[in-house]
Amino acid sequence: MIINDTNLEALRKTLNASFQSGLTLAQSDWDKVAMAVPSTAGENIYPWLKDIPGMREWIGPRQKHGLAENAYRVPNKDFEDTISIPRNAILDDTVGTYGVNAKMLGSAAAVFPNQLIFQAMRDGFTTGLAFDGLPLFSASHPIILADGSVSAYANTDGGAGTNWFLMIDHPVLKPLILQKRQDPLFTSLDRPNDPNLFFNKEFIYGVDARYGVGYTFPQLIWGSKQALSATTFELALTSLRAMKGDFGRPLGNMNAVLIVPASLEGAARDVVVSATGASGATNKWKDAAKLVISPWL
């Protein structure tokens, strides 16, 4: 193939088509635990992340739901993935296999939000901070009680084993945020006068995107590293269902989703899928939660 603008443009279009095809092939799991929020700047500021609002009898003046004194900020970060095609592969008309590489580039870009979100879930035990400045999973989240005093609540029982999670399937909110600033974009350095061709004899094709990841309300999710069993599941479920907002207002947490890595699939099915327990007795927690088995954990 002669290296000129016309032929390189045709190659670019072919690789971009393969990339776009790859974008459609990936399985999306992140949206089961996170909500997408659009972004138009370098970061999003969430001043509403202090309390889940609710109705009350209107006696006296309205009671306004306060916003967090220190707004919760989620910055957007840049991400990329890049492949190169040797100049000689184009000269010798052997670029056919690179369509597969471009399709894999698209597939990898499509599943990347899964990696971001489920990594953020794991980080919630340590470096992933909620709007109150504490790790997402903490035994010391502050809460205002009905009498106006400040107390603490837990959304974890600790542990040192394999992590698993139980979340509330809220109709509006999910416990994690995938902030979308820029969806995956196919780009290239494939002009005959590009310096990469002059110095390295290669054409470069890549994808870049911008995302941010954050958390909403800790009351919507439980994180554990204890052994997954009927006992630890019951603690997680009853704790989540008993969660309250500020001033003692019940949140009405009911529908639950159990999220586990593949290594805990058997234990999870014993807890929420099997009709009977180990002793043959009826399993009272059957269908108490939807089951999500994530390879990204």
Image (spheres, helix red, strand yellow):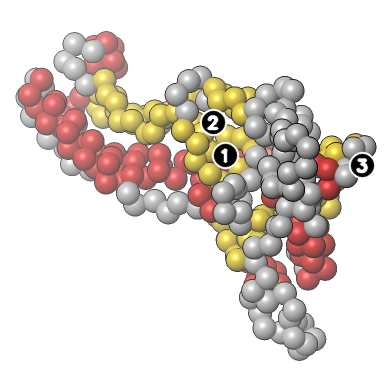
Q: Quadrant of the N terminus?
A: top left
Residues under labels 2 and 3: Cα distance? 37 Å
Mark 2 and mark 3 in contact? Answer it, CB < 8 Å.
no
Mark sitting on residue 147 = 3
- The span from disc 2 to disc 1 (Cα, nearest Å) is 8 Å
| Mark 2 or mark 3, earlier in chain | 3
Question: Badge 3 local density, few (<14 within 10 Å), some, or many (20+)?
Answer: few
Q: Position of residue 27 (x, y in %)?
A: 42, 54
Question: Which amino acid lies under the numbered mark 2 shown in the image of this protein?
Answer: Gly
Q: What amino acid is labelled 3 in the image?
A: Asp
For image coordinates 57% across by 42% down, the residue present is 117
Front position among marks 2 and 3 = 3
225 to the left or right of 22:
right
Q: Residue furthest bottom?
A: 280
Q: Secondary structure at mark 1?
A: strand
Which of the two residues, 2 or 32, is positioned nearer the viewer here?
32
Residue receiving disc 1:
177
Please name the residue shown 67% across and 24% down the image.
71
Q: Nearer the viewer, mark 2 or mark 1?
A: 1
Q: Position of residue 5 (x, y in %)?
A: 10, 20
Tell whether 20 sits left or right of 89: right
Q: Is residue 69 above or below residue 277?
A: above
Residue 212 image-quadrant placement = top right
At horizontal 34% and vertical 41% (from top left) the residue drawn is: 106
Dividing the picture into quarters, in which one does residue 129 lie? top right
Quarter of the view holding residue 53: top right
Q: Residue under circle 2?
A: 212
